[in-house]
Amino acid sequence: MLLNTPLGIEEIDFRIQSINKGGYATILAYKDARVDMNRLDAVYGVEGWQKKYEVINNHLFCSVGIYSEKLNQWVWKQDVGTESNTEKEKGEASDAFKRACFNLGIGRELYDYPIIQIKLEHNEFEIKNDRAFPTFNFQLKKWVWFSQFDSFGKLSYLGCKDQNNNVRFQFGTYIK
């Protein structure tokens, strides 16, 4: 396995970015920091990588270093984080780490994912104060996602079925 081997669909999470008043949900695919740590451990072992944080111009940066036997030195990639809406400091640190790991190639294929827009059923969203919100019937966490990649690591298929086994999204062609 390499750092830039596409993530398995079980390593990717999906969340609602927005729902418009017409009932179309935009879904985001993302990875969390544990995915990056697991990939770094799998490729380099727990002692073959490290991370450090520093504040530059009031912004939190994370640097991730991997030890290169070929160069006989540490190679570093760095990126900045943004605050999350829930846990400001933790979210910023996690975001900086995940972005630095994107720079190393972990999960970079997520940038090639299509825009995921799904027409919701009438009971899966409601309008309150002129804004659309999901209802309990929209159970995205119970959906099953599928992905396939070509020999170059490019996404060739992405699809999902809801909790009732109905196909809700497809991109590309699934090859059995």
Image (spheres, helix red, strand yellow):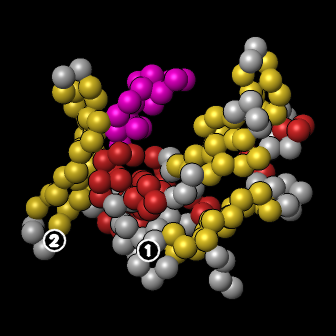
Against 31, residue 173 (above or below) is below
Indicate the position of residue 169 as horizontal and vertical percent values.
Answer: 71, 59
The residue mark sitting in front, 2 or 1, is 1
Magenta-colored stretch includes residue 94? yes
Q: Amino acid at mark 2?
A: Glu
Residue ranking furthest to the top: 129
Q: Nearer the viewer, residue 49 or 63?
A: 63
Q: Residue at x 74, y 30 (%)?
A: 21
Against 155, residue 49 (above or below) is above
Q: Residue at x 48, y 27 (%)?
A: 84
Indicate the position of residue 157 as horizontal and vertical percent values.
Answer: 60, 71
Q: Is residue 45 visible?
A: no
Residue 69 numbered tag: 2
Q: Is residue 170 left or right of residue 60?
A: right
Q: Amino acid at mark 1?
A: Gly
Provide the residue designation for mark 1. Answer: 153
Indicate the position of residue 91 as horizontal and vertical percent values.
Answer: 45, 31
* Mark-to-mark CA distance, 2 and 1: 25 Å
Residue 89 numbered tag: none
Query: Under tag 2, what secondary structure?
Result: loop
Q: Residue at x 66, y 48 (%)?
A: 117
Q: Quadrant of the C terminus?
A: bottom right
The segment highlighted magenta reads 81-97
Magenta-colored stretch includes residue 134? no
Numbered marks: total: 2
